[in-house]
Amino acid sequence: MESDMAHTHSHADTPGDDNAKRLMLALAVTAIFMVIEVIGGLLSGSLALLADCLLYTSDAADD
């Protein structure tokens, strides 16, 4: 006996893929700002920028 509820669909674009892309984008932006702050902190001798870089590192680790 065949079911009348047969259907087809594709999993090519699942919501999980979109979330993974967003997470990777957020991590990439965080890493870019982190590198910029390390360079700026070292060039200017600013402990505030270096400390803020550590905050970015902890944010990235939480993601």
Image (cartoon, rainbow, N blue to C red):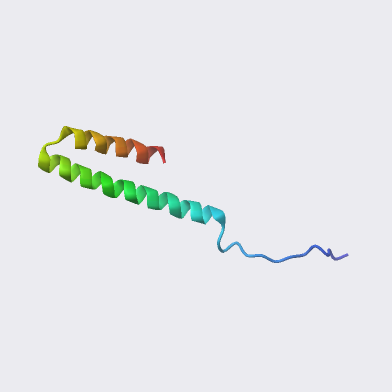
Q: Nearer the viewer, residue 10 or 48?
A: 48
The answer to whether 54 appears left or right of 17 in the picture is left
The answer to whether 40 appears left or right of 8 in the picture is left
**Is residue 54 positioned above or below 31 on the image?**
above
State how many labels appear: 0
Give coordinates of residue 26: x percent, y percent: 38, 49
**Is residue 57 positioned above or below 25 on the image?**
above
Q: Please report the residue visible at 17 percent of the width from the left and 33 percent of the height from the top.
A: 47
The answer to whether 21 appears left or right of 32 in the picture is right
Q: Please report the residue visible at 34 percent of the width from the left and 36 percent of the height from the top.
A: 58
Q: Nearer the viewer, residue 7 or 53?
A: 53
* Image quadrant where one finds the C terminus: top left
Q: Please report the residue visible at 34 percent of the width from the left and 51 percent of the height from the top.
A: 28
* Image quadrant where one finds the N terminus: bottom right
Q: Nearer the viewer, residue 18 or 12?
A: 18
Q: Quadrant of residue 46?
A: top left
Residue furthest to the right in view is 1
Q: Please report the residue visible at 74 percent of the width from the left and 65 percent of the height from the top.
A: 7
Give coordinates of residue 16: x percent, y percent: 54, 53
